[in-house]
Image (cartoon, rainbow, N blue to C red):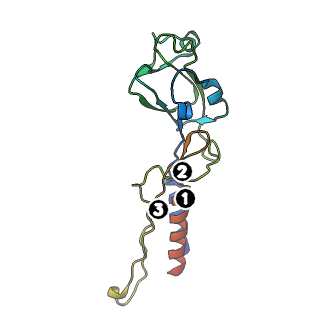
Amino acid sequence: MASVVALLVIATALVAAPVYGKDYVVGDSQGWTSGVDYTTWAKDKTFVVGDTLTFQYGSFHNVDEVGQSDYSSCSSSNSIQSYSDQNTKITLSKAGTRYFICGSTGHCSAGMKLAVPVSAASSATPSTPAATPATPSDDTPSTTPKTSTPSDNPATEAAPPKATTTSKSTTNENGAMESGPIKGLLVGVLATLGLAFMG
């Protein structure tokens, strides 16, 4: 009976496990500014649905999402979306190429433009290997359900401890925020299996 419960908990955890993408800081430490080769910056990265781009820039810049023809001609007159908050986070929500330019006069033609090819998310493989698994925030606990065995005296019955895990996001050498629920999931599964075999 305990092994059936353990298998059900594992199956539920695997089905319900959220998938987190990477957060790429555009231009890494230089950010979104003049003088950065964004084609080279993006070349060695694999962007997938669920990843985010964070544009960090000063007040003389902005981020305009445009179509392919406006990207090629550096025109922001038909922009899909414009941002000027100096810390813009854009989720890559569908497959296809996304195009971004700085709409300030002369900046796009001087190289402030970025084309991002986005691949469909794959549940089997991550976009790149994670250097350090982490959860997306410190305040999202992972818990295992309480289990108990019948006893003649309920007052002497001890409830198994809850397993909680938290870890911080880290930035890899490509400027991508590493995040993933694998570590928390494994701790929860191991705690559940341990409880199932103890009972």
Residue 146 seen by the camera: yes
Amino acid under label 1? Lys
Please name the amino acid that badge 3 sits on.
Answer: Thr
Name the residue carrying label 2.
Answer: 180
**Residue 122 image point, x, y percent:** 61, 42
Q: Which residue is mark 3?
A: 165
CB-based contact (under 8 Å), mark 1 and mark 2: yes
Task: Indicate whether 38 appears above or below 54.
Answer: above
Residue type indicated by callout 2: Gly
Measured in 3D between alpha carbons, the distance from the residue under mark 1 to the one under mark 2, in whole angstroms, is: 8 Å
Identify which residue, 199 or 111, lies in the foreground. Answer: 111
- Earlier in the chain: of badge 2 and badge 3, it is 3
Locate residue 137, reporting x and y percent: 43, 51
Residue 61, numbered label: none
Contact check, label 3 and label 1, Cβ < 8 Å: yes
Residue on which the image places disc 1: 183
